[in-house]
Image: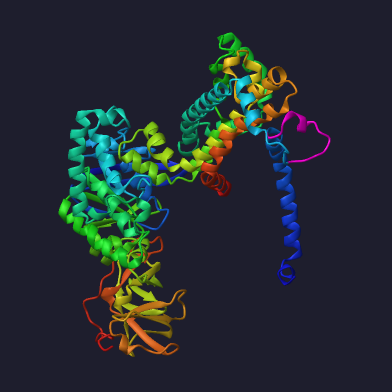
Amino acid sequence: MAEIGIRALHKAFDGADVLKGVDLTIEDGEFISLVGPSGCGKSTLLRIIAGLEPQSSGEIWIDGANADGVRPSARNLAMVFQSYALYPHLSVFDNIAVPLRMKRLSALERMPLIGRLMPSRRRAERTIREDVERVAGQLEISPLLKRKPGQLSGGQRQRVAVGRAIVRQPRAFLFDEPLSNLDAKLRVHMRAEIAQLHRQLKTTFIYVTHDQAEAMTMSGRIAVMIGGELIQVGAPAAVYDDPQDIRVAEFIGTPKINAFPARVRSDGRLEALGHVLHATTPSPAGECRVCVRPERIELGASGLLSGTVVHLENLGSEAFVHIGSAGMNAPVVARVNDPSQLPAIGAAISYGFAPEAIRAFDASGKRIATSVPSRIERPREMAIV
Amino acid sequence: MRALGRIHPWSAVRHVLLLAGALVMLIPFIWMLSTASKPQTEIFSSDLHLIPYHFALWDNLKIAFAKADLWRYLLNGLIVTILIFALQVLVALPAAYAFAKLRFLGRDVLFALVVFCILIPPQATAIPVFLLLHKLGVLDSYIALVLPFTISVFGIFLMRQFFKTVPDDLIDAARMDGISEFGIVWRVMLPTAIPAVTAFGIFSVVAHWNDYFWPLIVLNSEHLQTPPLAVAHFRNNEAGTNYGPLMAAAMVIIAPLVIAFLFAQRRFIEGITLTGIK
């Protein structure tokens, strides 16, 4: 159980800034995900928290104590690695027992031959056995205790790695992309298990992932990191719905948010692809981008914009229509909730979006406020789809 | 004829060449076995025959064991090679770990020096090392036989290349679990590197079991002599021109290596391919 504070953290590798001043407070018992594209510095941040990597400047506080210079094991954090990092020559039992043996046995007691003769070691081994068996039962890996990691499947290795982490009852858990090596189905399953584990243990979880779906589904808060900076921290729904930066808007959500080239007119109205939108902004006139989530794009004859269908993705429960439009680099993606109502590829189609769905960003990518004028000039165009 | 017709001519040539090469390698050993099995009269007879008319291997062995203390030489060889290998591992593993996995100032320069040291022939440093051992007053002892070889640059290089392939996550996990850096070397790296250590062990043991040059320089006492030296000694003083017992003694002395190789054969080849691909 620990609150972890990150203060003005900088890290440079060979002159290249990997972390550019990260400030974050992780609450006791919280499940927070650090999410961002690969190379954004999230794993480095996690390794600095763990003590495996020294920072260039800044501080890490764990439970109100400065952790700088404290050895990784003394920080009493547990880490689960992407490659699981199980000791290949040890059985599952011994893998899980390692952190306990290191903590509870003296150097003499750990000696290969002499240690076995010591009665104190025998006593300690008994409690270690109990703890390992309890954790194995909890994770349902009891039948595997005698096997070597090489004889386990990916999901089983994952459980053993988690077992090795929880057996020592650490103050916080650090997960470094633990599900990346699993197949898609197992990943979804393990997602639920890890979330369940968090509810059970009520310990601080810091979870690094590049998969925004993992971050969205498991965590209480997500911290979006891009280019060595924390861009936005908040509840998953808030980050999804209210992105403060176009990079956050584009990173969170699949398929990607649609970005229309647009501009702010001198009267404050937004104009996208030559069409004046029913939205105003207090921002100064100039180039901007108007972003709309795929589920907010409405297809129908009354839409303001038009294009041709270039691709269809039918997922069974829902479908995505890709629409090529003049003036757009990438196709506009629209979600259709009823896949039986799909247009044909190559068909001309009209589409639009409600002004409330607009998230506008200025030329530098920062969010700009938009509002829908209260005076309704004409009936909403999108009423009929 | 049909079966032969299907053999590709190049494949046949290839096998003939390989067989010829194998024969060149094997002939000295076959000759040794043949000579060891012949009585003195047949060894110097003018007709060339591999299989002796009178099988005299047991007699030759009996003479060899009677004339020289072969058991003592074998024991010396065992003590020296095992001591050398154990100390080499003790030095090479931590050094290789540091070179492969730790970041410190001047690491690459130091490693370049290590690689450079592989190029220096042991004969070049023999006289300074001899003088050093003389100053230490340890000439003509096991220490003189073992000490100069405790740091094996080849071993450091080989193990470093192997450790490079061990994932960093494993080491980080060990650090999180509270294992010290030396603990990581012996508890994590050594067990994962057993094939490489075995390969290195075979190189080391073969090289020092068969070493003739160094023991010849530093030893005087009969009771410390290692197997190759013993054989040579045998020829000069004890057996004279009696080649039968000499070859029988040579056979006894290479036997442990051959037997050990047969047992470790699979590991040996594993280790070599392992270092070959990485």
Left or right? Give the position of A149 relative to B17: left
In terms of image quadrants, where is residue A6?
A: top left
Residue A177 on the magenta segment:
no
Q: In the image, is residue A51 above or below residue A239?
A: above
Residue at the image point whose x is 63% and y is 16% from the top: B218
x then y, percent, for residue A364 = 40, 60
Q: Viewer-proximal residue, A166 or A152? A: A152
Left or right? Give the position of A332 relative to A339: right
State which quarter of the image contains the N terminus of chain B.
Answer: bottom right
State the predominant SS element of the stretch in magenta: loop
x then y, percent, for residue B138 = 56, 12
Q: Viewer-proximal residue, A131 or A64? A: A131
Q: Viewer-proximal residue, B79 or A234? A: B79
Q: In the image, is residue A359 above or below residue A71?
A: below
Residue at the image point whose x is 47% and y is 74% from the top: A329
Q: Is residue A181 visible?
A: yes
Q: In the image, is residue B197 above or below residue B75?
A: below
Q: Is residue A14 visible?
A: no
x then y, percent, for residue A325 = 44, 81
Residue at the image point whose x is 36% and y is 63% from the top: A251
Residue at the image point whose x is 29% and y is 77% from the top: A296
Magenta extent = B37-50
Q: In the image, is residue B232 above or below residue A174?
A: above
